[in-house]
Image (cartoon, rainbow, N blue to C red):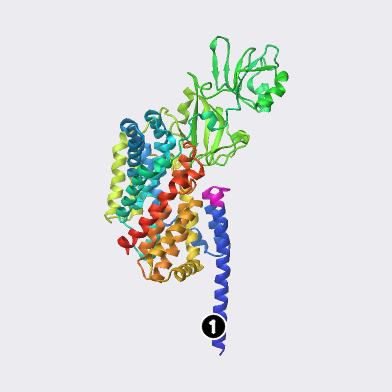
Amino acid sequence: MYYFYYTDLFKFLFSYFLTISIGILLLILAGAIFLFSTEKLPVDSTSILIMVLLMITGLVTPSEGISGFSHVGTLSVFTLLVLSVGLQSTGAVGYLGDITEKYASKGELKSLIFISFIAGIPSAFLNNTAIVAILLPVVIRLSEISGVNESKLLMPLSFAAMAGGSVTIIGTSTNVIVSSIHETNFGTPFSIFEFSLLGIILFFAYLIYMLLIGRYLLPDNKKELTSNYELQDFLLQIKILENSPLVGKTIIESGLDEYRIRTLEIIRDGGEIASVPDWDERLKANDQLLIKAQLNTLIENKRKLGIEINKEGKLDETSLSSENAMLFQAVIGNNSFLLGKKIKEIDFKELFGAVPLAIRRHGEALNQKVSEIELRFGDTILMEARRKNLDRFSNSRDFIVLEKIKKSNFRSNKMIISCLIVLAVVLLASTGILDLVVAGFLGVSAMYLTGCVSPKYVYQKVEWRIFFLLAGVIPLGIAVEKTGLGELIANSITQFTGTGSPQLVIAMLFALTVLLTSIMSNNATAVLLAPIAISLSAKMGINPKALLVTVMFASSTSFLTPIGYQTNTLVYGPGRYKFIDYFKVGGILTLIFWILSVILIPIFYM
């Protein structure tokens, strides 16, 4: 009697504990989704915060909490990132840009085909974010040569890289992570080309869709820089009068900054032009100043400042471009030291010899005070700089400059060696001679020993955000499994679908993955849903590989929003897209991928 009493009590307390644990985990998940979607914190910081909360609440042990740093998936992704950096260091990745410029055809149709293959094929083996970052300025120059608006080419560039990345296991970090989860649970990882047939079919489905339907849905946005940044009402020209208190003072002494007046150029008698003048440049009587300011401020203070406002109207990008200076755009990279800093905290003149004029984010020009804007990944900055200073942006990890500038000297004599090293890693891993993580570290060692890349360069260029993101969210998958949340969700799905329709389960799982990936990190989504997929497969008696590949493909091909995948974020500003453009163009493509996956995954992998 007492035995049954204590047994029932133990079951009650155990189920009660599980309920509390699931409730805490759901709260952590809700907070994570909020932070990932709003970018209140950088994604890597959010991931580390998740890891800490899971340990503090006891949902995972300390050893489980930090296991992400030594997880085979995290380390495999790290080696692939280093190998990509090695190819960039030797100029092998940049060579793609040279090929694109040399052989690209005129006309929208031919340009789309060429861009799709030049981005898609390398993305099957290299970091597709790096591929898009390299090709981004090249495609913009291609649009000028071909006469096709860049907004017609940049979204296809991103989508092609994403579709190409799904062809092999090493194409995206998400693929590697899902493969490592399969290895942890079932003893063997996926082989590199195990899902290539499905990936190739989906890639050509993307290409056919983009050529027949998608290109007609893409916007045809204006190229006028000043209007795109809503600067046309703020670029003005003034003349310093002879009795002005500004005469004889340097720019910093003049106090113009107090009136939110930013001096871009000084034109003097005789045609002398001081482009992006230094702070110690002295103002003279009759100087013509090209400035960024509010017209009302100038009108209210013109007598006090001793200036005359040019009555010929507003300026545009032509007025700010000369033999010595130019307007240009630069996208903030995802490994930039500028992330999280306000413009006023960065001495752009000293570091880069440039003046930031305006910023676009999420397809819209920010109308707040530029100096107060905190920079985020994917922000597009409109700047003016002396042409000779553009070299400072060369090979920068902080910016992707959307102009053709002189590149730093690569270790071009090591290009063939670096390519052979990566080829050897792929062959060793695909043939099963070495595990991917072992082959990856062997390749990294070879990159160092042959001088293809230096450790210092790797520290600067590796996308550490991805590493810390993965390390932080992997304990989340452990918590989902330990608390029983994965099994609970799996039970709910099977109760809804029954046990006789794996296609329906695949359809639901694919849709859930796409929706979550659209608002949070694709890696976090894969880690979260992989345990649920494994529980589902056990309950339905089907091959877990089928459901894991569903999660893998759905999280790696998030076309619905600009924030669901890094390549989408990169082209968001330069393409001057709106949020709805991704939903409109990517929504149909996602539907096509969904239908094909529901049909083909059971045929190929069950």
Residue 522: x, y in percent?
Answer: 46, 52
Q: Residue at (38%, 44%) from the top-left corner?
A: 213
Magenta: main secondary structure: helix
Kind of element beneath mark 1: helix
The magenta span reads 35-45
Task: Give the residue type at disc 1.
Answer: Thr
Is residue 215 among the parts visible in the rendering? Answer: yes
Q: Nearer the viewer, residue 526 or 279?
A: 526
Q: Residue at (63%, 34%) from the top-left corner?
A: 369
Is residue 450 shown above or below 602? above
Is residue 284 shown above or below 123? above
Residue 229: x, y in percent?
Answer: 55, 32
Residue 400: x, y in percent?
Answer: 46, 35
Q: Residue at (73%, 20%) from the top-left corner?
A: 304
**Quadrant of the rendering where the N terminus is positioned:** bottom right
Q: Is residue 44 magenta?
A: yes
Which corner quadrant of the image does residue 10 belong to?
bottom right
Residue 519: x, y in percent?
Answer: 51, 52
Is residue 192 among the parts visible in the rendering? Answer: no
Q: Is residue 282 left or right of residue 133?
A: right
Residue on which the image places disc 1: 7
Number of numbered discs: 1
Residue at the outermost top position: 270
Q: Residues within 10 Å of mark 1 (few under 14, many from 20)?
A: few
Q: Is residue 236 left or right of residue 131?
A: right
